[in-house]
Image (cartoon, rainbow, N blue to C red):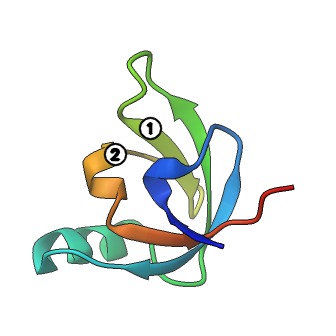
Amino acid sequence: MTITLDKIKKDEEVLIKRVQGEEDIKRRFLDLGFVPGEKTKCVLVSPFKDPKAYFINNNIIAIRDKDAKNIEVFYERD
């Protein structure tokens, strides 16, 4: 199943499928390591549920939900 990154819950790991959006935000995500084929995991959710922090390439990156909607991921529910 394909969803956007903002939809995953804490401790869920997903595989990045595609990064979309305006060229500047797309380039920023690619520079941070959010590239197709890379695994990422939600490791922290702020008290107000936005932003969330993701572990990728041995780094933790916080992203607002409105920006995370630009990242499509492969997701499997048990």
- Image-quadrant location for residue 58: bottom right
Q: Tell me if I can see residue 59 in this picture.
A: no
Amino acid under disc 1: Lys
Quadrant assignment, res 24: bottom left
Q: Nearer the viewer, mark 1 or mark 2?
A: 2
Quadrant of the snapshot with the C terminus: bottom right
Q: Is residue 69 left or right of residue 9?
A: left
Task: Judge whether residue 43 can be spotted in this image.
Answer: yes
* Mark number displayed over residue 52: 1
Which residue in the rendered view is the most extreme toward the top? 47
Label 1 environment density (alpha carbons within 10 Å; few <14, some 14–19, many ≥20): many
Q: Residue at x 26, y 49 (%)?
A: 66
Residue 22 horizontal/vertical position (percent): 13, 75
Q: Is residue 28 above or below residue 62?
A: below
Does residue 33 appear left or right of residue 41 in this picture?
Answer: left
User: Between disc 1 and disc 2, whose residue precedes?
Assistant: 1
Q: Is residue 6 above or below residue 3?
A: above
Kindly identify the residue that appears in the image at 29 percent across and 78 percent down: 20
Could you tell me residue 76's position as x and y percent? 76, 65
Q: Residue 38: which numbered mark, if any?
A: none
Residue type highlighted by circle 2: Asp
Residue 47, position in %: x, y?
44, 15
Provide the secondary structure element on which disc 1 rests: strand
- Circle 1/circle 2 CB separation < 8 Å: yes
Q: Residue furthest right?
A: 78
Q: Residue at x 48, y 58 (%)?
A: 5
In this rendered view, identify the residue nearer to me: 17 or 32.
17
Which label was assigned to residue 65? 2
Image: 55 above or below 33 = above
